Amino acid sequence: MDGHQGLYFPAKPSKLAIDANIGHLKVMIDLPIQDVYRFCPRCGSASSKIGAVPFRCPSCDYTQFFGPVGAVGGLVVNDSDELLLVRRAKNPGLGKWGLPGGFVDHNESIEDALKREVHEETALDVISFDYLASFPNIYRYKGVAIPVIDLFYVCRVATPYQIELDRTELESYHWCRPGQSELNDMAFESNRKAVVAWLDPP
Ligand SMILES: [Zn+2]
C-alpha cells in the first residue's frame, strides 16, 4: 500500500502523541510501530532513539527490526469465473468490500492460513489455489500502524454456493466480475490491487 505509507504522520515524532485535540476536531494519528517502542521489551531500559529501525537497546543491545506481519487473502473464483467479494461488518473498513483472509498464526504455513481463514469467514473449503501477487499493507489499531505483507491466492472451492458467513466479521457477499463500483468501495488498497491483478494479469 505505497500511498498509505505517506499517511504516517509525523514521520519522526520525538514523543508519543496519539490523540491531538485541535479546536473541536479530534485527530487520530497512527504512529508507526517503531515510534511506540519507548522502552526495551527485554530489559525495560528507556530507548535512546525512539523511531529508529531497527530498535536497538542502549543497555542490553537487544535489536528488533519490525518486519511485516504475514497475512493472506483469497480470491475465491466460481465456475463462471466470478469473484467472491465479502462486505465487512466491522472496522477497519466497515461496510466496504474485501476478500476473505487474515493474519497468519504462529507456527502456521501460508497455505494453512489461507485455508483456515477462507473456511472461518465463509465455511468454504479451498481445494486448490495459485499464487497471484503480494502487496504491502498497513494494519491500524489503537493509533498504531503495523506493517503487513498481504499474500494473495486465487482459490477454487469444493462447493462455491454453500456459503455461511462469519457474521461477526462479514455482513454479505457478492459474486461478480468487479467493476468500478466495487473497486472504488474496497476496504483495503492491497485487496483492490489484488482484484485488479486478477482481472488484468500482466
Ligand atoms: Zn534492553
Image (tube, rainbow, N blue to C red):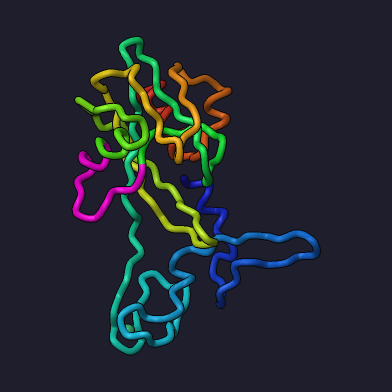
Is residue 191 depicted above or below 47 in this figure?
A: above
Instruction: Please report the residue visible at 46 percent of the width from the left and 78 percent of the height from the top.
Output: 38
Q: Position of residue 167 (x, y in %)?
A: 45, 35
Q: Position of residue 23 (x, y in %)?
A: 80, 64
Instruction: Please report the residue visible at 56 percent of the width from the left and 74 percent of the height from the top.
Output: 16
Is residue 7 depicted above or below 75 in this figure?
A: below
Instruction: Please report the residue visible at 45 percent of the width from the left and 17 percent of the height from the top.
Output: 176
State the residue lying farthest toward the bottom.
59
Residue 133 in view: no
Q: Position of residue 118 (x, y in %)?
A: 31, 34
Which residue is more in the foreground, 93 or 161?
161
Q: Quadrant of residue 162?
A: top left
Q: Which image quarter has ligand 1?
A: bottom left
Image side of residue 180 versus residue 123, left or right: right
Which residue is more in the foreground, 61 or 116?
116
Residue 24 in view: yes
User: Which span is picked out in magenta?
Assistant: 102-114
Quadrant containing the C terminus in the rendered view: top left
Which residue is more in the foreground, 89 or 115?
89
- In the image, residue 153 lies in the stretch drawn in magenta: no
Q: Position of residue 191 (x, y in %)?
A: 44, 36
Image side of residue 1 versus residue 117, left or right: right
Instruction: Please report the residue visible at 60 percent of the width from the left and 61 percent of the height from the top.
Output: 29
- In the image, residue 107 lies in the stretch drawn in magenta: yes
State the residue lying farthest toward the top.
80
Number of numbered tags placed on the structure image = 0
